[in-house]
Image (cartoon, grey):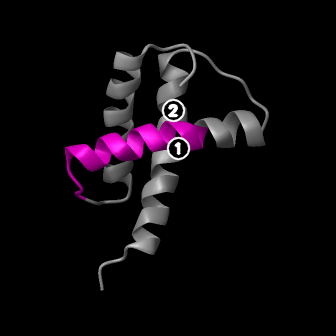
Amino acid sequence: MVGVNWFVAILIGIFAGWVAEKVLRRDDGLLMNLLAGLVGGLVGKWLIVDLLGFHYMGWVSSAIAAIIGAVVFLFLWGLIFRKR
């Protein structure tokens, strides 16, 4: 996450994971929300900055990127570890 400190990045990660969980109608818990948000921040940065070429700074842009990445991460996680 660009332009934010570690503490804010963790808070954004938890929030992004929670939003992604609600979008996908799942209930994974706080630790999975944190993991999804932090991994989502990396995935979102890769998608937005590296793949599309857009650059961003600040907590709002970081949160949007993390939410997008967290949704992608949780969707792929659900495909791989689907409960049968």
Which residue position holds label 1? 68
Relative to the observer, which residue lies in front, 38 or 70? Answer: 38
Residue 30 is labelled as none
Query: What is the magenta range?
Result: 27-44
Q: Amino acid under label 2?
A: Ile
Measured from the top left, where is residue 10 in percent x and y?
A: 35, 27
Q: Secondary structure at mark 2?
A: helix
Q: CA distance from mark 1 to mark 2?
A: 6 Å
Residue at 37% from the left image edge and 59% from the top image edge: 24
Q: Is residue 37 above or below residue 82?
A: above
Residue at the spot 32% in from the left edge and 40% down from the top edge: 34
Amino acid beneath label 1: Ile
Residue 44 lies in quadrant:
top right
- The percent position of residue 46, horizontal first and vertical second, equals 66, 40
Left or right, 64 with respect to 84, comes to right
Q: Is residue 49 magenta?
A: no
Residue 4 vertical placement versus 78 (above, below): above
Residue 18 visible in the displayed image: no
Q: Residue at x 48, y 14 (%)?
A: 4
Tell me residue 81's x, y (percent). 38, 73
Q: How many C-alpha atoms fall within 10 Å of the one at disc 2: few (<14), some, or many (≥20)? A: some
Q: Are marks 1 and 2 in contact (CB under 8 Å)?
A: yes
Q: Which residue is mark 2?
A: 64
Quadrant placement of the C terminus: bottom left
Count of number-bearing discs: 2
